[in-house]
Image (cartoon, coloured by chain):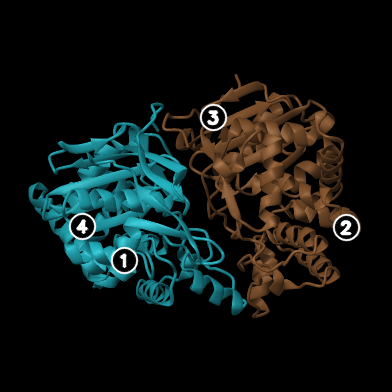
Chain colours: A cyan, B brown
Amino acid sequence: MSTKANPVLVNTLRGDLVECQHRGAIAICDPKGRIVESLGDIDALVYPRSSIKPLQALPLVETGAADHFQLSNAELALACASHGAEPAHTDTISRWLARIDLDDESLECGAHAPGHIASAEKLLLDHRQPRRLHNNCSGKHTGMLTAAKFLQEDTRGYIDRDHPAQQRWMDAVGDMADLDMRQLPWCYDGCGIPVIAMPLVATATAFARFGTPDDLPAKRAAAAHRLAQAIAAEPFMVAGSGSLPTEVMQLAGLRILIKSGAEGFYAAALPEQGLGIALKIDDGQAEASEVALLATLNHLGVLHRDELAALSSRCRIPISNTLGVVTGHHQAASIWE
Amino acid sequence: MSTKANPVLVNTLRGDLVECQHRGAIAICDPKGRIVESLGDIDALVYPRSSIKPLQALPLVETGAADHFQLSNAELALACASHGAEPAHTDTISRWLARIDLDDESLECGAHAPGHIASAEKLLLDHRQPRRLHNNCSGKHTGMLTAAKFLQEDTRGYIDRDHPAQQRWMDAVGDMADLDMRQLPWCYDGCGIPVIAMPLVATATAFARFGTPDDLPAKRAAAAHRLAQAIAAEPFMVAGSGSLPTEVMQLAGLRILIKSGAEGFYAAALPEQGLGIALKIDDGQAEASEVALLATLNHLGVLHRDELAALSSRCRIPISNTLGVVTGHHQAASIWE
């Protein structure tokens, strides 16, 4: 992360006063890696976290595993997902795991309670413990297992940095972002696989190429296109009820592909404009990353009037107190003016 | 909030890399309002939120209501509390409300689920809805009702800005902070009473006077002393299981009085040193406010060696992933070096 102070992207107001500030950086790039617009330090190394799951899923298609196992759009979307572990998510992944002769126990991510609150409460009321299947990354893991299974690799230890399942996405993401992923700082992600820090400008470029893959090798372009189609066709599977990615893609389909990452990260591809976006809120706040993303999409003119109307309470998020009184808002600073 | 960039107070590391930064400001003052040390913009107006509850409780004692109703240390501590709605909290407040011929329905704060996770889960498992009693501010509200009842005021509408219950604390806090509270920006707090923005330097000064009230008028000094004694005697009642205020005051007693506020605020009084502290994390993150507070207490030399040892995982908070692997830490930047 930059040692310089990035600009304030989002303010949290209470009454007329700014109660909290959220700084950050945004890169908007084209598929040639040219910076179209930017704010803040877009060269600093930042973990993209789950935002790059669509890029990490490229080998699932490119290896032939997706064809071999006849993966549906829903399954491909889940491979790119941070899902809320709603029944439709976990049921689909369970059946998918069974089809590749594996089960919940084959997943090497840890268990955590469903991100979808009602699903978490249901689990508690049923006196059931969260399983690995409920991990928001279980679709990504199942995708990695599927490619490993297809290639007849030992699936045990597939989360280890040296396992081909991890090496494959490092190669793919490195190609897409013009980076040598093995030379960059890394650590473990929430789900146990490696997470590698990248400059925002590289992540934005990779997403521009993902959404507008015309200049990529044919096999890569076909894989990117297939994943993008799957995400747009099954936006619920990429995140879930009440989430921004699901709502935006339910409205805009293939025109606006967005993926959230932990700690205030967002990546987006705009296929019609040939643009990729990567943004990071320095302090990691999720609401601020959503507001900053929507302000950027609006600035680029890609949200239609009816979409903007439908998303109005997400562009400027009201904050209510325990009496239901709206006391303030999360709202974008004048970042693109 | 300041338009200038405050310094980075706390970093969130993943591996060796900073994943998130938390900026903010800290004021350390003496009872005369002199700035002993500071970081960042301590003159900007910031909502202190629940941090000033100990100051807001002064009229409860000064009016004679606390004596009249023979309030216990536990009840006085609850009047100053942001409690987790554990059974000991809600049971004590229920009995207190009954003693003043009121009940949960007399509280005008909204209901919210207990902050203490196990208590919230218990409520869910019992198929019970959160009540106003579970609001973390229900002790403060009961304190306000107690003074109003003692003074034979109409308790209905006691949360309104114009009600004597609100005017009383504005006078007391204004006196303690050398501010005209009615001239400052205000809005509604989470629990529905007014929240008024104050400079950090004023909040720190008020806390210095609260902890070291020697130069205050005798009645005010006695009230501050009684509340401080109650908080130190009943640290569980001020917050609850697993919370920083409870743990620090269980260790240090009357030597270190601390009170958290929403959106990254902390206030503290150090009676032996004659100092008050007020700090705000710009982005509102609670963990960062705790780390910054402990770094400041440590810098001031007020934590004994055994206390530091007991608090080590709070001074540098480990972050674990779903597999239980420690992937990083919330840790103080080199703020006081």
**Which chain does the residue under circle 2 lie in?**
B
Query: Does residue A192 show up?
Result: yes
Circles 1 and 3: CB distance less than 8 Å?
no
Between A210 and B246, the residue placed more toward the observer is B246
Q: Please say if B132 is above or below A335.
A: below
Query: In screen coordinates, is A154 left or right of A168?
Result: right
From the image, tell me which residue sits under label 3. Answer: B43
From the image, tell me which residue sits under label 2. Answer: B71
Query: In screen coordinates, is A188 left or right of B214?
Result: left
Which is more N-terminal, label 2 or label 3?
A: 3
From the image, tell me which residue sits under label 4. Answer: A62
Q: In this rendering, do the residues under marks 4 and 1 share a single chain? A: yes
Q: Secondary structure at mark 1?
A: helix
Q: In this rendering, do the residues under marks 3 and 4 share a single chain? A: no
Give the image location of residue B30, x and y in percent. 72, 25
Q: Please say if B261 is above or below B160.
A: above
Q: Amino acid at mark 1?
A: Thr
Between B32 and B254, the residue placed more toward the observer is B32
Query: How many residues crowd around disc 4 within 10 Å: few (fewer than 14), some, or many (20 or more)?
Result: some
Q: Amino acid at mark 4?
A: Glu
From the image, tell me which residue sits under label 1. Answer: A246
